[in-house]
Image (cartoon, helix red, strand yellow):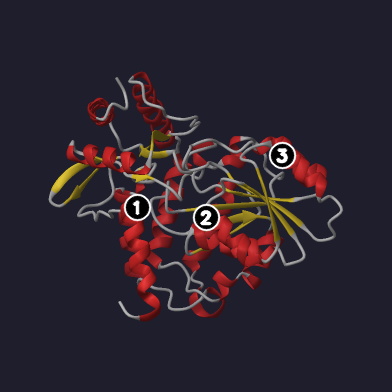
Amino acid sequence: MAGSLAFMNEELDRMKREGLYGNIRSLESPQGAAVKINGKEYLNLCSNNYLGFANDARVKQKTKEMIDKYGVGPGAVRTIAGTMELHLELEKKLASFKGAEAAITFQSGFCANLAVIPTITTGEDLIFSDSLNHASIIDACRMSRAGVIRYEHSDMDDLRKKLKEHAGHAGNKLLITDGVFSMDGDIAKLPEIAGIAEEFGVIIAVDDAHGEGVLGRGGRGIVDHFRLHGKVDVEIGTMSKAFGVMGGIVAGSAVLVDFLRQKARTNLFSSALTVPDVAANIAAVEIMEAGEERVKTLWENGDYLKAGLKAAGFDVGKSETPITPVIIGEAQAAKDFSAKLFENGVFATAIVFPTVPKGTARVRAMVSAAHSKEDLDKAIAAFVKVGKEMRVVK
């Protein structure tokens, strides 16, 4: 490779040597409890399809009906000609579901963070960010040009200390945290965070990507889970996980949503969500509003898998949610563990640096409401078999 692109080969070679190069598998079937890869069926423990909506018959039917009525694409950004009545219907349903005054949708959860953080902060402001916040928050903070102050993960003493240190700062202050931390499965200490934010007069935002459809009544999220309605200024979320579709959510006051409609660059300069996405998300919300059965099954499955793996001697960290990290240690060992699981019919991907700190590489097991107890027994048996072969457990 000539010229300035030669560094790419060098970097890819380094990643391969250090076990950081990802082997990306492609699916030949819908997302579900099992998926087809290379013509063979595997138990699926990789997907964020928490409630099994990605291939739900009701979601698919709604999507087909709306495609027949509205076509497939919006054809423009929201502020020119891309806002369809379907978008407004979804946003109204989301606001009601979240118990907020208003909601606005974006192309993804990543885009939602890029919409919020650089729009409501400037170079004169400060952002207080949990040290384990998602990459989309980190990138959005960089784009904002605000000063970024990281506090130790879920450490309320450190947060309070840093807020005190900057109490005299003249600009606005934004405190942002993940709701559920996706690599470890722990939940933000939102009641304490909200109290501290109120004490110091700080705007508070929570990215609830892994809490939507998981926490709260019928999956209404972390704010509902802790009964903090009116105490959190900005709820950011995604419809690519529990909703089983695609798209980002921001819920809050009517003023916040109006401000983002007028100023957020991902709303002004990128086309609106497609008709199939919007229709499928409407169906997902309607199902969640109708009952809590899927959410309850998800939690039962998560507890069952975690208990089985823990009893076998695996380190499953301190997860408080259905996310089940099986911590292996070094990157190559985690990749080898994942590969051996695959040989035994279980699709569970290794998570390595820089997604998680060095020395904490893991196989992250993601259950869904679509899994049966038989599925989970099969998964536990495969983990135990590979764990013994690799001397991870006795």
Using the image, tell me which numbered label, if any, was put on residue 158: 3
Residue lying farthest to the left in this orientation? 39
Instruction: Identify the image quadrant of the N terminus.
Output: bottom left
Residue 180 position in % (x across, y down): 53, 41
Which residue is pictured at 54% across the width and 42% down the height? 220
Which residue is pictured at 39% across the width and 70% down the height? 7
Q: Quadrant of residue 361?
A: top left
State which tag comes first along the sequence, 1 or 2: 1
Q: Amino acid at mark 3?
A: Asp
Report how far apart the C-alphas of labels 1 and 3 lie in the structure: 44 Å
Above or below residue 81? Residue 292 is above
Mark 3 nearby-residue class (10 Å; few <14, some 14–19, many ≥20)? some
Above or below residue 271? Residue 182 is above
Report how far apart the C-alphas of labels 2 and 3 lie in the structure: 21 Å
Q: Is residue 70 visible?
A: no
| Secondary structure found at label 3 | helix
Which residue is identified by label 2? 135
Judge by depth and name the residue closer to the eye, 100 or 301.
301
Q: Nearer the viewer, mark 2 or mark 3?
A: 3
Which residue is identified by label 1? 59
Judge by depth and name the residue closer to the eye, 11 or 369.
11
Residue 386 position in % (x across, y down): 24, 30
